[in-house]
Amino acid sequence: MSTGLGDRTVIAGIGQTEFSRNSGRSELQLAAEASLAALDDAGLSVCDVDGMVTYTLDSTGEFELVRSLGIKELRYYSRAPYGGAATCAVVLHAAAAIASGAANVVLIYRAFNERSGRRFGLPQAPAAVSSNGSYWWRWYIPFGLDTPAKWAALHFQRYMHVYGVTNEDFGLYSVACRKYAANNPNAYFYQRPITLEEHQNSRWIVEPVLRLLDCCQESDGGVAIVITSRERGRDLRHKPVRIVAAAQSALWGGDIVSDYYHDDICGMAEIGDIAAKLWTQSGLRPGDIQAAMLYDHFSPIVFMHLEEFGFCGRGEARDFIKDGNIEIGGALPVNTHGGLLGEAYIHGLNHINEGVRQLRGAAINQLPNVEHVLVSAGMSGLILGQA
Amino acid sequence: MKRRVPLPVRDDQFFWDGVAQGEIRLQRCAGCGKLRHPPGPICPWCHSLEVRIERASGRGTVYSYVIPRHTAIESDGDPVIVALIELEEGARLVSNLCGVAPDRVRNGMAVEVFFTEFEDGVRLHQFRPMEGSA
């Protein structure tokens, strides 16, 4: 296979803070709390940590977290580019560091006050130079395309046009994930399921693509993950979760949040590329996956994930979801914690924690016989498995 | 009406100079002859640094469109329509669609460019339906 990462690294621990709309504390504190929870879950201490990875968009500097936690010495630290695109990339970077011998125990963190602090959903100003992808947004913002919902919607409308998909179809996903969230005490929308009628009555955000209930939350909170080698993972607190395959993708013609320049934008070429890489690395097929955690900043991207990974054909995600396939008992339960729409928007990292819980048999909406979980965030993806 | 400044940078100044002159300008590689947009300093096919700047016809079709219900830009009461325009030359370009009711917009609709002066001297390319296509 094309990578040796799969057999050599594991997720040893996961941690998170509560998810809210106002954490009442600093982003550094959220990062520190989530990190300690993940280390405790792994049965490791700060003295074991010698590597660190986060998103380029995270505001907590490595030195601040090292100082706060009392970490003695880092041998490796890096950041994965952009926002949601970094979701599984941070695990790839950590696993690559461990597989190469650059580090032994890598702490991954992502923490922000994205609701009470700087809200991503508010209109953005153009930037001449930036590392977060906003360089291209200069071409969009003067025309009123100034939020992630708008960038993404202009891409999704083409998909709707070509396959005859409606906003009500997208609502099928919102209803399904809110049902999972309603049963999850850690979800912001705990005990608050929605009906398709409520979805259709929620206000337009970007017509004719996204209503309010198609859009993820803006959340405060922190998530952390501890990665180590397979050998080191053997005698820790929990049975480790194997990193079976991990990949990032950047393709010519691609863009961040939007996707306007590929010949065909009725899917997302990078997701298809991630799918090909993960299937090749793992030797697995769609039928080998028992659950999928799919990045869901907006409901339509879940449709593209299902189609690009081959869980259903092009334009068929609507029927796949309508037939109950993403719910418990279906062919591929999706976002069993409630997703970014139902649980919280911690930039996708909370999806990985749910994947780990499903493999440990510790999820609130636990599925039977979980051998492999897919986690995908468009520009990066993972297959996790039983060790 | 107020709009954000497009914020030209060195690699696309020619485009915004074109907008100021009332035309859409595109880069064509002087080495291999391929058209590219958004602009860039180097040809991704042959790596030539030489370009010819060409004036686009300004005609195209609506590739996709949206009507944002909450936007920082102001309009005179009409909903702002944002469209991804596919120019005749093949390049895709984000712009606004004017002179058509939101419920009359269709993918594939034939459109043509015009230019509007907004507040603070911000000049932008806009599109409207070609005569007979609305």
Image (tube, grey):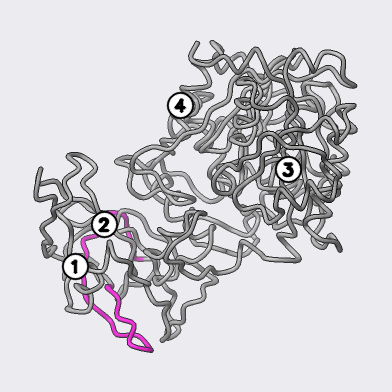
- In the image, taking residue A84 as reference, residue A220 lies left or right, namely right
> Nearer the viewer's eye, disc 3 or disc 1?
3
> Which amino acid lies under the numbered mark 2 shown in the image of this protein?
Pro
Q: Residue at x 62, y 61 (%)?
A: A120
Q: Check disc 2 and report the residue beneath it.
A: B39
- Identified by mark 3, the residue type is Tyr
- Label 3 environment density (alpha carbons within 10 Å; few <14, some 14–19, many ≥20): many
- The chain that hosts pointer 3 is A
- For mark 4, give the secondary structure: loop
N-terminal-most mark, 4 or 3: 3
Residues under labels 2 and 4: Cα distance? 35 Å
Residue B99 in the image, given as x and y percentages of width and height: 29, 76
What chain does mark 4 sit on? A
| In magenta segment, residue B117 | yes
Q: Please indicate whether residue B42 sits to the left or right of residue A80 in the image.
A: left
Q: Alpha carbon of mark 4 to alpha carbon of mark 1: how far?
A: 39 Å
Task: Name the residue tied to disc 3.
Answer: A109
Q: Would you place residue A272 above or below residue B39 in this image?
A: above
Residue visible at 61% across and 40% down? Answer: A78
Label 4 with label 3: CB-CB less than 8 Å: no
